[in-house]
Amino acid sequence: MKVIIVKDYQKMSNEAYNFIEELLKEKKDAVLGLATGSSPIGLYKLMVKGYEDGVIDYSKVKTFNLDEYLDLPKEHKQSYYSFMHENLFKGINVLKENINIPKGDGIDHLQDCKMYEELLNKHIIDIQILGIGSNGHIGFNEPGTSFDTTTHLVKLKEKTRLDNQRFFESIDEVPTHAITMGIKSIMKSKKIILLATGKNKAEAIKNMIEGPVDENVPASILQKHDDVVVIIDEQAASLLKK
Ligand code: GLP
């Protein structure tokens, strides 16, 4: 695991962007694994700028998103579908048919999980972007999730719902369930870049890097992956020993 500690959010975004730019210059048809949340927004802004400046072309790129809320219409402002379109897809030339996001508002959720996993199995993600929940979750793989999971349905922990409440009018509006790429699916990515800033993430970062590999800290599995880059600010790194 390579850990890069930077001064602030912007520096974190720049570092992450360099990896994406390098990949996309080399491999026009790269497959990107994408995350939602506040952590990757700065990176997505740079990815849009890269396109506007003519540095990156996304016309052959495929994307797979990590997760989606369950039973939230995709047109809802807080669906991850809307988030991704607002923060990235509307600003770049990725083709609609190359965008993949788990379907959270379907009729048969189990079938939708199966279909997403089948699609994932036909691709290899070159770079997977990850954030981390304050409880150590990745995607929506909450503490206690088996490391062996593929795309599946989850009941969100109250801590996660509270953390995400800031995006909704009230806690009652925060969905209780989600569909997420599993840990096994995430681990198949060639390279993983995890982003985190702020004190709120310090404990999760410490447990992920220095704690035992334990299903109660889903992100700790990343210790077993051979190409992970963790880019964090000083606050998120503040509890690390080394
Ligand atoms: C959500 C998402 C995760 C994300 C996490 C952290 O729960 N499902 O994929 O990593 O939040 O979000 P943020 O970056 O806003 O702290």
Image: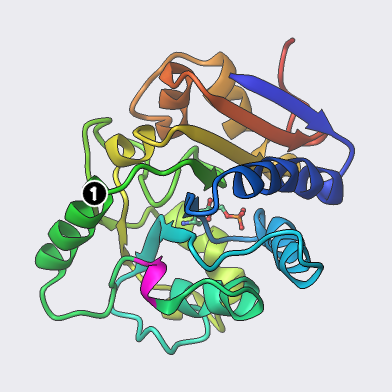
Task: Please identify the quadrant where the N terminus is shown.
Answer: top right
- Residue sitting at x 68%, y 40%: 19
Up-down relation of residue 201 to residue 158 (above or below): above
Report the residue marked by disc 1.
122
Task: Determine the secondary structure under disc 1.
Answer: loop
Based on the displayed image, in which of its 4 quarters is residue 146 positioned?
top left
In the image, residue 14 lies in the stretch drawn in magenta: no
| Residue 138, position as x, y percentages in the image | 45, 43
Residue farthest along the bottom direction in this orientation? 75
Regarding residue 51, the answer to whether it shows in the image is yes
- Residue 202 higher or lower than 27, as above or below: above
Residue 133 in view in this figure: no
Label 1 crowd (10 A; few <14 / some 14-19 / many >=20): few
Q: Which residues are magenta?
A: 97-101
Q: Is residue 67 left or right of residue 55?
A: left
Query: Residue at the top extreme?
Result: 242
Residue 229 position by quadrant = top right
Residue located at (56% from left, 84% from top):
169
Residues 195 and 206: in front is: 195
